[in-house]
Amino acid sequence: MHKLTILDGGMGRELQDIGAPFSQPLWSAQALIEAPEFVSQAHQNFVDAGAEIVIVNSYACVPFHLGDALYQSDGARLATLAASIAHNVCMKATSSNRPISVAGAIPPPFGSYRPDLFDADKAKLIVASLVAAQQPYVDLWLAETISSIKEFEVIQTALSTTGKSCYYSFNLDDRVSNQACLRSGESVSSAAKRVCQTGAKAILFNCSIPEVMEQAIKDAKQVIEAQDGDVEIGVYANNFMPIKTDHEANSSLQPMRELSPDDYLVYAKRWYDAGASIIGGCCGIGPAHINALSQWKCALLDQ
């Protein structure tokens, strides 16, 4: 078998499922503000399920979710709190001889799935604040739900001086095609070329439907092999119905589909066979799904 690392699952939906305070537009930041013990419990649930990388709950610590006033007064503090909570949960697991890595999360500064809303100058300040807030508590960086190469370049510049491994995860067009594309319409192949040029640890694909992930893996792998690169490929799909290009992320909760842990595992095995070595879940993929992945990994190791 080739290497396989299990990532955690969707934090927002897990918080909602365990009864944390949760509403739009605050999303997963509401628990940080009102009841941070739920954030700790959600991380613990994924660790108990077998996750080997835990992502900091800082996805909503941006003006898009907090609003400008709350972001200015408390955004950095909330991101630091989120990172410290993840760190504490993982330290407990590590003390039990089970090392867990903490991934500092860099979310889309202006909302998911909307490359048209990206403002590079404003994004630089937001990303810099998120980096400074989380830096003392994280082992690596995971920039999530990147919708364009321009967005990647701004984030990559900010992370390049941190001295930590960088993982870049792109959001895909949910239309199935023989060429995988980002939300911006740019090809995964073009994004993979840029990632390979930066010394990144991994390129991933997240918060897109499972059906589009395999082609993205194949396209990225072809580029990585052509450039003789040493970049891992990862996937953490969502449990949503396909997302339209004009989606308003703060207007309502995205409709869910019925994707059981066994259903998700069928996709995961295909991703692994195609070349993915990091697999987890995004929105709607909970601890039961991650446990199925972990049990599958154990079975692979026993072969």
Image: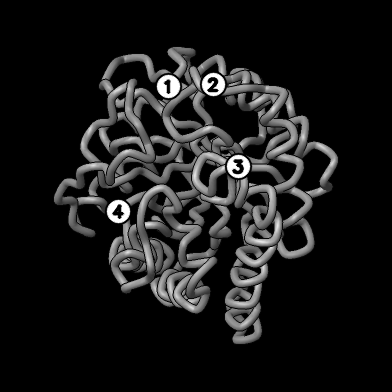
In the rendered image, is residue 296 in sight? no
Q: Which residue is mark 3?
A: 68
Marked residue nearer the N-terminal end (2 or 4): 2
Mark 1 vs 2: CB contact within 8 A: yes
The amino acid sitting under disc 4 is Gly
Which residue is at a point 42% across and 29% down the rendered structure image?
Answer: 113
The amino acid sitting under disc 3 is Asp
CA gap, disc 3 to disc 1? Answer: 25 Å
Q: Is residue 253 above or below residue 228?
A: below
CA gap, disc 3 to disc 2? Answer: 24 Å
At label 4, counting other C-alpha atoms closer than 10 Å, the crowd grade (few under 14, some 14-19, many 20 or more) is many
The amino acid sitting under disc 1 is Arg
Marked residue nearer the N-terminal end (4 or 1): 1
For residue 261, which numbered disc appears in the image?
Answer: none
Mark 4 vs 1: CB contact within 8 A: no
Q: Which residue is mark 2?
A: 148
**SS at mark 1 in the image:** loop
Which residue is at a point 53% across and 66% down the rendered structure image?
Answer: 32
Which residue is at a point 65% across and 67% down the rendered structure image?
Answer: 81
Image coordinates of residue 279 in percent, x first then y, are 43, 50
**SS at mark 3 in the image:** helix
| Position of residue 218 in the picture relative to residue 157 (left or right) | left
